[in-house]
Amino acid sequence: MLPARRKIRAGIRLSKSLFNYGSAWAYSPGRNFIGGLLRKTVVIRLVSSWLAGACLAASINAQKPAAVPSTLPGVSISAPKIDGVLSAGEWPESGHGDGFFDKDTGLVSDEKAEFWIGYDDHHVYFAARAYTDPKKLVDEEYRQNVGLEGNDAFYLALDGMSLGQDFDVFAINPQGATSLRLAGGRAAKTEWIGDFESAGAKTPEGWLVEAAIPWTLIKRPSAGKRSLVFNVLWFRSNRSNTYEWVYTQEDFAKFPKWIDVNVPEVKKERTAKLLPYGYAGWDKEQGHVANFGLDLKSELTDSMTLVGTVNPDFRNVENAILSLDFSYFERLANESRPFFQEGSRYRSFGFDQRIFASQRIGDFDAGLNLYGEIGRTTLSWLATGDFGNRNSTALSTSTRLNDKSSIAASYVGNFQRGAQNSAGRLLYDQRVKDFTIYAGGMGTKDGVVGGGHQLTAGMFRESGPYTMFLDYSEVSPNFFPRLGFAPEKDFRSLFAEYGREIQPNGKTIRDYSFSVQGQYADHYHGGEYRRKAEGSFNVTFANRLRLASQAMVERFEGSNDHLVGFSLGYPQGSPYRGASINYQKGRFDGIDYKALSVQTRYRPVRRSQVNLSMQWTEYDEFSRQAILSANYDLSRDSAIGGRLVRRNDEWNWYLSYRLSGRRGNEYFLILGDPNTPEFRKTLVLKAVVPMTIRF
């Protein structure tokens, strides 16, 4: 999880994960706040250290990537055979690239890889080859449209609209397993996502992949000769690290171009894809149960998508479970419902404070979800109705003004008797060399609480081995987004952070990193709120053993708090086999705090996975939580699985059979309820029958 203030830069920048490649209000903080801040030596030192670090980073002659082409020509080719064999003359030499760089630091990869890209009127063709030890590859996945985290894989990232807002990302591992992350975000339904042909193979020199990607899967411009923004990424499990062909430093202007591509006129049928469902079963409390509903999806244009749902049912969706970690404030688990996942990357509603969080919307009767791109602007609009109770809407837009700047605006409305609420947001960001500068704010108007606001401005540098961040924020006492998430209010705050990652040349340590950060905050109308300093140090050894440590001291609302923590994990980066242990000890609000957590991951046989997470905390009273999950793939499209959750004296478990992830009917047989605190005696069979209406 990102530390609180890091969420700001994670949302503004082009994300550093390998799956994400989103008018400002001028103001002056109160003079009393600034005057008090400047009298505090610790804050002066923090800001001075930050500025000194910035100067030092600019002065150090770090290793720079060798010059590579910033463009590749579009080459029309005859359709290659997708068979895991790179036959002579099959792939265009003019569409060839090689040489990869660490995505975070820009250091040259110590292993070689290369790729080819071409196209015809129906597909974009992609092939890649890595020269590495084939015996050390991680290629556990063998299915289509699955997550490939931890697997060796090549990723082709395409921004067909050249907007810099989002990418279509196509990934293939050595077994030919695929992962799709289409622009805007999609729910994991094959009829809605689509698929593409792929093949992979191990060779004595390493491994290779081939793929044929339909143009219909790609957000693309109108037909004609065009230039598309792209990059190729390569995840190496032997270093748990991602490399890219062109080292971009998350700067959209530095991304390579695929030029002179004759984008074809793709004749795509206008359809409405329907997913009607029905379920029937038995429940101990209700007796016989039955219900039905409908999900639908339609591509209104090549760049706009409409999703709808009537009487939605999420009984086959596991909700995320929060840990027992201490917090003075409310926490929210991640959203896992498919309706809200569609178009999620086109939504920008805030960071630490945000005016919309879909988790606030519980059961509802019907919903619409429109998202896509109009010119240089992305759009997302959500509307849900719980008839007779509450209607809600959330609108978000983001416009890339040029390669260096963008502006985002959003509105959220909650229409409910006695709880009327509206909220708005505006954010501007500008890239200046290696820094991103941002400013913006949010405002709310509530029928009960009244009006409130949030303002923020700052700058950060998070490219190469250095992290630098400086942020001012203020939140008024009456800031209240009913459909959002605002855990902290009534403060003015200055936050600073400096961090660095180092990859030494020795054979013992793979990398290590450290960060220091501090916060000085007063209440909005004066009076001490928080003084905080925190540091962390992490090291990963060549054998993939990872050690991490943290220390924090804080004065919060008059309470002198502190926390120290240590963790140990092995092997780093493996989602299938491994273990980690974390211990924390501290004091909050005058009460001692201790926490111990253990996580294990084990794959007994190829198609199975067992995960166990346990946590014990002591803070005024003893609490414990255990989560055991297991899954076994019967085939590429069917599996049995379940989850057991114990939280203190409450137990819940469920078992399920799933036939899904393919085109055609889907079936779910579920014993128990995945999302209740305690076991519920219920057995339900759910069926989903896809239908298509052409118009």
Image (spheres, rainbow, N blue to C red):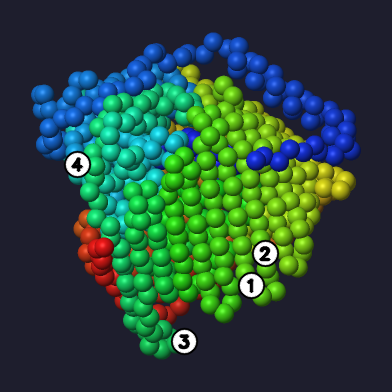
* Relative depth, front residue between 509 and 287: 287
Quadrant holding the N terminus: top right
- Disc 3 marks which residue? 285
Amino acid type, label 2? Asn
Determine whether the residue tagged by mark 1 lies in a helix, strand or loop: strand
Which residue occupies the foreground of this view, 398 or 208?
398
Residue 209 visible: no
Q: Which quadrant of the view contains residue 111?
A: top left
CA gap between label 1 and label 4 equals 49 Å
The amino acid on which the numbered mark 4 sits, given as a three-letter code, is His
> Which label's residue is closer to the chain start, 3 or 4?
4
Work out how far the residue at label 1 is from the one at label 2, CA to CA, in angstroms.
8 Å
Circle 3 or circle 2, nearest the eye: 2
Question: Mark 2 highlights which residue?
Answer: 421
Give residue 462's position: percent from left, percent from top. 56, 29
Tell me the tag on residue 122: 4
Is tag 1's residue or tag 3's residue first in the polypeptide sequence? 3
Q: Mark 1 points at which residue?
A: 416
Pointer 1: residues within 10 angstroms few (<14), some, or many (20+)?
Answer: some
Tell me the quarter of the image containing the C terminus: bottom left
Please count the marks in the image: 4
Q: Distance between the residues labelled 3 and 2?
A: 36 Å
Residue 396 position, x and y percent, is 54, 51
Q: Nearer the viewer, mark 3 or mark 4?
A: 4
Left/right of residue 635 with respect to residue 473 in the rendered view: left
CA gap, disc 2 and disc 4: 48 Å
